């Protein structure tokens, strides 16, 4: 689940970040004050407890600046760390290390924040079969790495894009003429390989979905715990159940206890706190 992505996929994203940081004339501070051929060793250290993510990307950032840098990942993506732990060691040209520092830390701090928040929610669901999943509420252009960070935190991924699965939301239902209409359309047109999920806001809508058939998963949107429990009982395992809305560290255990199969949270990728990581020479 926490396998690394091919560097080939990540490289354009990291290269763009480096180009943004270098500007039109490069790192003039480093070029001005660091004597040529100065060699140094640096470490990325954790300033707080966390679950690590972004080490693959940090290493790639340094290598894109200077392929001769020696990089040793001490604590890999998906592993916990404590305050003061060294996550990565970088040795080689001091100017190259300084040039890649900010981009490496920007990615690593943010992705570690996502992994850490995810791990906190996952821990609250221990003892249940519920999976914590992310959503498409990601930073534009960074979805693939943010979703990877969710995996590093022990969570699971929802759709990567609109083309992955059919997810019928309330606006689709309204525009298409109702629940029966959208489910009939999916049965008539969708590939047999395509999963279908449909959002419901009420138990009445859920009953209509169950009677009509054609859905693999029902998204139980913004239902309170009592209603979720009733919904799971109504479904009786015939389709998967996903709870969404009002998912916080304080509420997730109670939601999982209702028996839902999945809990999706946009907060994993839009409301995390960046973890404090530092590069120390």
Image (cartoon, helix red, strand yellow):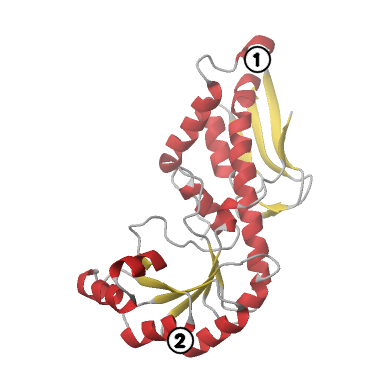
Report the residue at 65% width, 15% height from top: 29
Question: Helix, strand or loop at disc 2?
Answer: loop
Q: Which circle, 2 or 1, is nearer the viewer?
A: 2
> Count the marks: how many?
2
Image coordinates for residue 186, horizontal then vertical, percent: 26, 72
Give the residue at mark 1.
29
Q: What is the number of the mark on residue 60?
A: none
- Please tell me which residue lies in front, 249 or 67: 249
* Contact, mark 2 vs mark 1 (Cβ under 8 Å): no
Q: Which of marks 2 and 1 is nearer the N terminus?
A: 1
252 in relation to 91, above or below: below
Report the residue at 54% width, 40% height from top: 57
**How far is disc 2 from disc 1 in space, using C-alphas?**
62 Å
- Please tell me which residue lies in front, 226 or 123: 226
Image coordinates for residue 214, horizontal then vertical, percent: 31, 79
Report the residue at 45% width, 41% height from top: 10
48 in relation to 66, above or below: below
Whether residue 137 is visible to the viewer of this picture, yes or no, is yes
Whether residue 126 is visible to the viewer of this picture, yes or no, is no
Question: Helix, strand or loop at disc 1?
Answer: helix
Give the residue at mark 2.
237
Res 11 → quadrant: top left
């Amino acid at each position: 689940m926490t396998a690394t992505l091919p560097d080939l996929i990540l490289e354009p994203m990291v290269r763009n970040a480096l180009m943004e940081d270098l500007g039109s004339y490069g790192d003039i501070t480093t070029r001005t004050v660091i004597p040529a051929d100065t060699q140094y060793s640096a470490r990325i250290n954790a300033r707080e407890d966390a679950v690590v993510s972004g080490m693959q990307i940090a290493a790639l950032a340094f290598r894109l600046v200077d392929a001769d840098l020696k990089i040793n990942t001490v604590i890999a993506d998906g592993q916990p760390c404590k305050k003061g732990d060294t996550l990565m060691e970088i040795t080689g040209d001091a100017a190259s290390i300084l040039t890649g520092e900010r981009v490496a830390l920007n990615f690593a701090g943010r992705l570690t924040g996502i992994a850490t928040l995810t791990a906190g929610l996952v821990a609250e669901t221990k003892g249940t079969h519920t999976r914590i999943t992310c959503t498409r509420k990601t930073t534009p252009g960074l979805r693939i790495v943010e979703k990877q960070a969710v995996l590093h935190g022990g969570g699971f991924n929802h759709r990567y894009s609109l083309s992955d699965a059919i997810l019928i939301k309330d606006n689709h239902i309204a525009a298409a003429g109702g629940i029966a209409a959208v489910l009939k359309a999916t049965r008539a047109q969708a590939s047999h390989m395509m999963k279908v999920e449909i959002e419901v806001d009420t138990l009445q809508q859920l009953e209509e979905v169950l009677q009509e058939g054609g859905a693999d998963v029902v998204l139980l949107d913004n239902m309170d715990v009592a209603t979720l429990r009733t919904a799971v009982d109504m479904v009786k395992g015939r389709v998967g159940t996903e709870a969404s809305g009002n998912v916080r560290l304080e509420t997730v255990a109670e939601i999982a206890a209702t028996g839902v199969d999945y809990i999706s949270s946009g907060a994993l990728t839009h409301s995390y706190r960046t973890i404090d990581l530092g590069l120390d020479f």
